[in-house]
Amino acid sequence: MTGGKMPAPAPWMRRRKGNALIELTLLSPWVLFLFVGIVDMGFFCYSLIAVENAARVAAEFTSKSALVAASQSAACTKVLAELSSLPNVSSLTTCDATPLTVTAAAVTGIDGGAATSVSVTYQGVNLIPIPGLLMGRLNVTRNVQMRVQP
């Protein structure tokens, strides 16, 4: 090493140009697919939680008295207010068509007392259809039953 020259690196240590580009080209579709799946799953989980909360709020409202225990319009109003941040719900005024269906009924509870039952069905939007896994839209249905307050 006294002459100022470095010894030539071994052949396996030489840097080959273009390796990183080839690796990036081969891995980028998988990373993009994973990212899109995570975002799609996030939207589905958000709608699942929102529908559960909307059904609970509507059942809580309809359980206040026997007069509103079977009031579908009151349940619809509460559900629309809760789900206003979801896609394809903000422009709805009724709850009897496909993206959102709400039913409320007066039923007999498991303890034999008067109860209300609210069912909310929401058809979510699918960002990117995944062939073989997620081809259609995902439906979320939640049922809540509460005792009517005397």
Image: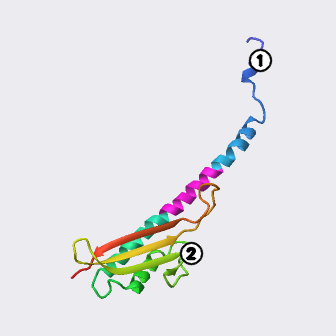
The 10 Å Cα crowd at callout 1, few under 14, some 14 to 19, many 20 or more, is few
Q: Nearer the viewer, residue 79 or 114?
A: 114
The 10 Å Cα crowd at callout 2, few under 14, some 14 to 19, many 20 or more, is some
The alpha-carbon separation of the residues under discs 2 and 1 comes to 65 Å
> Residue 60: horizontal and vertical position, in percent?
32, 76
SS at circle 2: loop
| Amino acid on which the number 1 mark rests in the picture | Ala
Side (left or right) of 52 relative to 17: left
- Give the vertical position of 61 relative to 129 (above or below): below
Q: Nearer the viewer, mark 2 or mark 1?
A: 2
Q: Residue at x 62, y 61 (%)?
A: 135
Q: Residue at x 51, y 67 (%)?
A: 139
Side (left or right) of 97 relative to 142: right
Write down the residue under mark 1: 8
Q: Earlier in the sequence, mark 2 or mark 1?
A: 1
> Residue 147: horizontal and vertical position, in percent?
26, 76
Side (left or right) of 32 relative to 105: right
Specify the segment rendered in magenta. 32-45
> Residue 58: horizontal and vertical position, in percent?
37, 77
| Amino acid on which the number 2 mark rests in the picture | Asn
Write down the residue under mark 2: 88
SS at circle 1: loop
Q: Are marks 2 and 1 in contact (CB under 8 Å)?
A: no
